[in-house]
Image: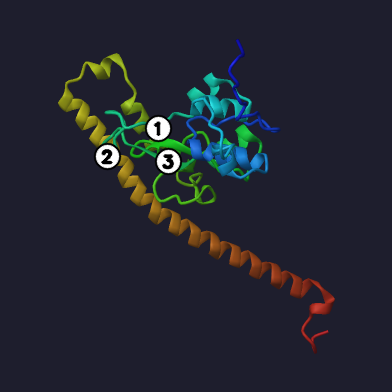
C-alpha cells in the first residue's frame, strides 16, 4: 500500500529567533520576518495552494527553530475566556516591552517588542526604572524614572499589596478591596504627579543645556584669538 503523500509546507528559517516572554504572536512574527528578510505574509501562509496540518504553535516552533514548549510558554494565545476581560483588574492589553529588558535579552537596543501586560497593574519596569504603562506610544518614549523614585516605589508597593500571602488571604473581602483600592489610588495619583514632574524636569534640562551651550560659546569667544571682537586686540 502506497503511503499517503504529506507535503512539507512549513520549513525552518535560516536564522532562528527566541521569543520574548509574554510576546504577542504578531510581534514575534514581525521580528522573525525581519531577521530573515521575509514578508510576514509569507510566514503566515507559506503556500498559496497547500495547507499545513500543523497547528499555529507547531508552525511557529518549526519556523523559529524553538521547541513547542518554548513557544507555548513564551507566546500565550489569549482566547475569549472568562478570565480574559477587557475591563476590570484582570484586563490585559498589548504594550511595548521595556526597551532595556529587550536590549539585555536580544542584544539589540533598536529592537521593538510588543508583549501582553496588565492594563491596570503593570506601569513601571522596576529593575530599569522606566515608565512602560499608560500614554507610552513607542518604546523610545518610555520615560526614565531615575529622578522620580517615588513612582518606582509606588509600583513596588502596588505589587506587594497584590502578592498572595497567608495573611492577606485571611483578610475579609472588604479589607482586601480597601488595600487594593488604596494601592491603585496611590499609583494613579503618582501617574498624574509624574506627568507634571516629567514636564518640569524636561524644561529644567532644556534650560540647563541651553545655559551650558551659552557658557561654551562664551568660553570659545574669549579663549580663541580668532574669535576676539575686532578692535580689542
- Residue at position x 75%, y 71% in the image: 220
Task: Point out which mark residue 44 bears.
Answer: none
Question: Can you give x and y, in whole percent of width and height, for residue 98 in the image?
Answer: 52, 40
Q: Classify residue 229 as left or right of residue 54.
A: right
**Residues under labels 3 and 2: Cα distance?**
14 Å
Image quarter hosting the N terminus:
top right
Please report the residue visible at 26 percent of the width from the left and 16 percent of the height from the top: 167
Foreground residue, 221 or 137?
137
**Of the residues tagged 1 and 2, which is closer to the observer?**
2
Of the image marks 1 and 3, the number of the one nearer the N terminus: 3
Q: Is residue 210 shown left or right of residue 162?
A: right
Q: Indicate the secondary structure of the residue bearing disc 1.
A: helix
Q: Badge 3: how crowded within 10 Å, few (<14), some, or many (20+)?
A: some
Q: Which mark is residue 94?
A: 3
In the image, 214 versus 8, the foreground residue is 8
Left or right: residue 38 compared with residue 147: right
Decide: marks 1, 3 in contact (CB < 8 A)? no
Q: Quadrant of residue 8?
A: top right
Measured in 3D between alpha carbons, the distance from the residue under mark 1 to the one under mark 3, in whole angstroms, is: 21 Å
List the residue tagged with mark 1.
156
Q: Position of residue 154 (x, y in %)?
A: 37, 37
Task: Please rate how many residues cluster around mark 2, counting C-alpha atoms within 10 Å: few if below 14, some from 14 to 19, many from 20.
Answer: few
Using the numbered discs, state the Cα–Cα distance from disc 1 to disc 2 in whole angstroms: 23 Å
Q: Relative to residue 169, is residue 189 depicted above or below?
A: below
The single residue placed furthest to the bottom in the displayed view is 231
Give the labeled residue for mark 2: 87
Q: Earlier in the sequence, mark 3 or mark 2?
A: 2
> Disc 2 on helix, strand or loop?
loop
Give the SS element for disc 3. strand
Amino acid at each position: 500500500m502506497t503511503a499517503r503523500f504529506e507535503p512539507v509546507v512549513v520549513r525552518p528559517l535560516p536564522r532562528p529567533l527566541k521569543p520574548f516572554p509574554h510576546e504577542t504572536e504578531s510581534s514575534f512574527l514581525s521580528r522573525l520576518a525581519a531577521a530573515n528578510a521575509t514578508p510576514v505574509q509569507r510566514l503566515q501562509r507559506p503556500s498559496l495552494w497547500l495547507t499545513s496540518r500543523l497547528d499555529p504553535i507547531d508552525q511557529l516552533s518549526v519556523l523559529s527553530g524553538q521547541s513547542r514548549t518554548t513557544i507555548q510558554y513564551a507566546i500565550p494565545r489569549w482566547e475569549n475566556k472568562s478570565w480574559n476581560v477587557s475591563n476590570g483588574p484582570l484586563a490585559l492589553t498589548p504594550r511595548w516591552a521595556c526597551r532595556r529588558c529587550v536590549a539585555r535579552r536580544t542584544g539589540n537596543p533598536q529592537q521593538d517588542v510588543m508583549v501582553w501586560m496588565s492594563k491596570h497593574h503593570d506601569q513601571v519596569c522596576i529593575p530599569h526604572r522606566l515608565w512602560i504603562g499608560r500614554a507610552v506610544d513607542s518604546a523610545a518614549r518610555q520615560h526614565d524614572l531615575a529622578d522620580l523614585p517615588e513612582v518606582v516605589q509606588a509600583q513596588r508597593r502596588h505589587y506587594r499589596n497584590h502578592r498572595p500571602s497567608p495573611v492577606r488571604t485571611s483578610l475579609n473581602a472588604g479589607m482586601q478591596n480597601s488595600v487594593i483600592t488604596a494601592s491603585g489610588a496611590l499609583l494613579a495619583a503618582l501617574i498624574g504627579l509624574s506627568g507634571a514632574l516629567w514636564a518640569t524636569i524636561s524644561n529644567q534640562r532644556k534650560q540647563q543645556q541651553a545655559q551650558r551651550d551659552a557658557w561654551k560659546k562664551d568660553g570659545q569667544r574669549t579663549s580663541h584669538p580668532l574669535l576676539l571682537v575686532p578692535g580689542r586686540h
